[in-house]
Amino acid sequence: MSNSSSAVVTISMSFGNRLRLRRLVLGWSQKEMAAALDVSPRAVWKWETGKPPILLTQEAVDARLNIVENQRKKNLKK
């Protein structure tokens, strides 16, 4: 019996887990992530270990990482 509908799985991750995963995918240390986000390495450590920044900062971090990842993809195509 085939099922023509596709299942969508939603995984809920905390901001810290998402940040850590993105950092690891990029192959960066916390220090390198901090430099890319223009924050201290301690801030990255705090965010990854469960003390998230305020919502506005989370959105800014996500936006900055999207820019960095898009630039990295463009550089890999060259």
Image (cartoon, rainbow, N blue to C red):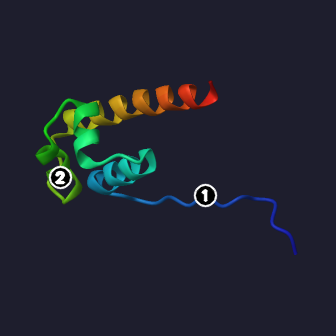
Q: Position of residue 12 (x, y in %)?
A: 40, 59
Q: Residues within 10 Å of mark 1 (few under 14, many from 20)?
A: few
Q: Which residue is mark 1?
A: 8
Give residue 74's quadrant in the image.
top right
50 above or below 26?
A: below
Q: Is residue 62 left or right of residue 69?
A: left
For image coordinates 37% across by 34% down, the residue present is 65
In the rendered structure, which amino acid carries the disc numbered 1?
A: Val
What's under tag 2, amino acid-wise? Trp
Please report contact status of discs 2 and 1: CB closer than 8 Å, yes or no: no
Quadrant the N terminus occupies:
bottom right
Residue depicted at 23% across the width and 55% down the height:
48
In this picture, residue 65 sits left or right of residue 45:
right
SS at badge 1: loop
Residue 56, given in percent of the width and then of the height, sits at: 21, 33
**Location of residue 35 by image quarter:** top left
Side of 29 relative to 55 (left or right) = right
Using the numbered discs, state the Cα–Cα distance from disc 2 to disc 1 in whole angstroms: 32 Å
The answer to whether 37 is drawn above or below residue 4 in the figure is above
- As displayed, is residue 33 above or below residue 8? above
- Quick one: which residue is furthest to the right in this view? 1
Seen from the viewer's position, the closer of residues 6 and 14 is 14
Provide the residue designation for mark 2: 45
Q: Label for residue 29? A: none
Task: Give me the residue at 20% from left, 34% from top.
Answer: 57
Q: Residue at x 19, y 60 (%)?
A: 49
Residue 70's spot in the image, x, y percent? 50, 29
Q: Quadrant of residue 38?
A: top left
Answer few, some or many: residues within 10 Å of disc 2's Cα (few below 14, many 20 plus, some between 14 and 19): some
Q: SS class of the residue under badge 2? A: helix
Indicate the quadrant containing the C terminus: top left, top right, bottom left or bottom right: top right
